[in-house]
Image (cartoon, rainbow, N blue to C red):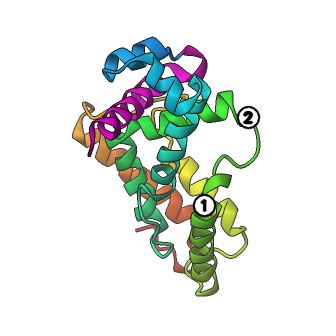
Amino acid sequence: MGDGQATRRRLLDAAAAEFARYGIAGARVDRIAAAAPANKAQIYAWFTSKDGLFDAVFAEHLALIVDLVPLDATDLPGYAVRLYDSYLERPEVVLLATWARLERVPTGDLLTPAADDVASKLAAIREAQDRGLVTADTAPADVYSMVIALSMAWSPASVTIAAGTGDDPAEHERRRTALAAAVRGAFTPAADWSGA
């Protein structure tokens, strides 16, 4: 990686941390430049504005948001638990999406730029429904949205309790168990659900 590419990478990483912490409106270009370390002129040369820098950061993280955890539509409870764990490891992914929702896209589909990746996940859910493994009375897009919403119950965007890596391991295990049970109960056909 050349010097220019290394500087650009440092700027994107510093900007991701800044935007995750302060949002778009609260982020400061001078703090990003200082954290990089780089100069503000480089930010404007590459990204034209603070908004352009956020767009670049969010576009890069959108792939992480959608693909952070591979979807196994035959194991939605496990998928939800793996998402919970990924939010502990990469809280900035959730925080950037939250700021994009609050400051950029107040309604509608936040994941539109990743439509092809999401479409493949929805097709997998539809296939699991056709095989009788997932309840068929809910649209695949709604199943996907609700599983993600359940997985975020203790995420950095939670309005009740935000889990952290320093929490008691027993608390994490209790949450994982409850999350898996909730997803299983919501999306497993009643005839196949043993409550296990």
Element on which disc 1 rests: helix
* Residue displayed at 67% across by 27% down: 103
Q: Position of residue 108 (x, y in %)?
A: 76, 46
Tell me whether the residue at label 2 lies in contact with that at label 1, contact meaning CB atoms closer than 8 angstroms.
Answer: no
Q: Nearer the viewer, residue 79 or 179?
A: 79
**Does the magenta segment cover residue 51?**
no
Residue displayed at 52% across by 79% down: 192
Picture quadrant where residue 177 is located:
bottom left
18 is within the stretch colored magenta: yes
Q: How many marks?
A: 2
Above/below status of 27 relative to 5: above
Binning the other alpha carbons within 10 Å of mark 2 as few (below 14), some (14 to 19) or many (20 upward) gives few
Please name whichever residue, 97 or 144, is drawn nearer the observer in this view of the structure.
97
Up/down of 163 relative to 62, above or below: above
Q: Quadrant of the C terminus?
A: bottom left
Q: Amino acid at mark 2?
A: Pro
The kind of residue tagged 1 is Tyr
What residue does disc 1 label? 144
Q: Is residue 80 above or below residue 165?
A: below
Measure the C-alpha gap from mark 2 to mark 1. Answer: 19 Å
- Secondary structure beneath label 2: loop
The answer to whether one can see residue 59 in this image is yes
Q: Outermost residue toward the right?
A: 107
User: Position of 124 compared to 109: left or right?
Assistant: left
Main SS category, magenta section: helix
Tell me the crowding category of disc 1: few under 14, some 14 to 19, or many 20 or more residues within 10 angstroms, Cα based.
some
Residue 109 % position (x, y): 71, 49
Earlier residue among tags 2 and 1 = 2
List the residue tagged with mark 2. Answer: 106
| Magenta stretch, residue numbers | 1-26
